Image (tube, rainbow, N blue to C red):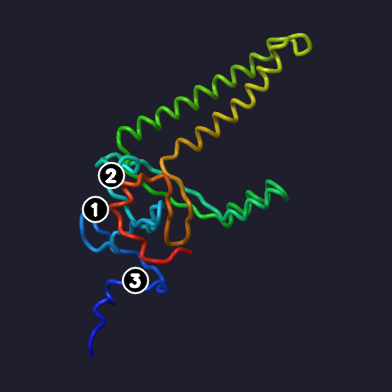
Amino acid sequence: MSQNPFSDSIPNPYQAPSAPTFATSPFAGGSPYDSGVWRQGSLLVMHRMARLPDRCVKTNEPTAARLKQNLFWHHPAIYASLLLNLIIYVVLANVLGHRAKIEVGIGPQGLARRRTVIWTAWLGVLASVAAFIGAFQFDPESSQAFLPLLLGGIFGFLGFAIFGLICVRVVSAKRIDHHYIWLKGVCPAYLQQLPEFPYPPR
């Protein structure tokens, strides 16, 4: 009986995924389907058990530095529960959401940018707190400085806190399921060296 010469090279999209046997790096040869790391358009797709290469995800330069990232994702439809109640949203997000812990390669430029974001966020938060406290040094009824300082402190605190939480992330999750993680924020040069994700978009 003749064998199908393509049976080992073409993945079956209906086959349940299993934990791959990982190559040292998807850039270092070996079967691309064994690395556990692929690209899908502008996204990086990785198996939950995969280890990303020792390359900076922002510049694609070789690096030994790695940064731990705690990822969380839930289906966008869950945001609709905010119309009902914030507590309902929090419960649904935590019950139906997916979490993952990964390590990404990060170069000196990425680390420097991250430190700048952290310092900027902290200085902004501290300045906002100072403005909020300083507002009460003025008479609310007669001073024109009271309201600008008060509102500036409140909105500044929220703005810099959100800025820090969002911008400090090197990559973020576009989607997470029980087997795979889809990441956005990876530079195109990094993605171009990865094989295409063998399964159709879901």
Q: At 34% from the left edge and 60% from the top edge, which residue is drawn?
A: 196
Task: State the separation of the CA atoms marked 2 and 3.
Answer: 27 Å
Above/below status of 149 relative to 9? above
Mark 2 or mark 3: name the one nearer the start of the chain: 3
Tell me if 184 is positioned left or right of 146 in this view.
Answer: left
Q: Nearer the viewer, residue 81 or 133?
A: 81
Q: Residue at x 59, y 25 (%)?
A: 156
Residues at marks 2 and 1 touching, judged by CB atoms closer than 8 Å: yes
29 sits left or right of 69 in the view: left
Q: CA separation, marks 2 and 1?
A: 10 Å
Question: Percent x, y for residue 12?
Answer: 37, 73
Residue type, mark 2 in image:
Arg
Residue highlighted by disc 3? 11
Question: Could you tell which of marks 2 and 1 lies nearer the N-terminus?
Answer: 1
Determine the residue positioned at 36% across, 44% down.
187
Q: Residue at x 58, y 21 (%)?
A: 128
Numbered mark located on residue 13 in the image: none
Q: Secondary structure at mark 1?
A: loop
Q: Where residue 180 appears, x then y in whole percent?
A: 42, 59
What residue is pinned by disc 1?
27
Please give the residue where the numbered disc 2 appears in the rendered image.
55
Helix, strand or loop for disc 3: loop
- The CA span between labels 3 and 1 is 20 Å
* Mark 2: few/some/many CA within 10 Å (<14, 14-19, 20+): many
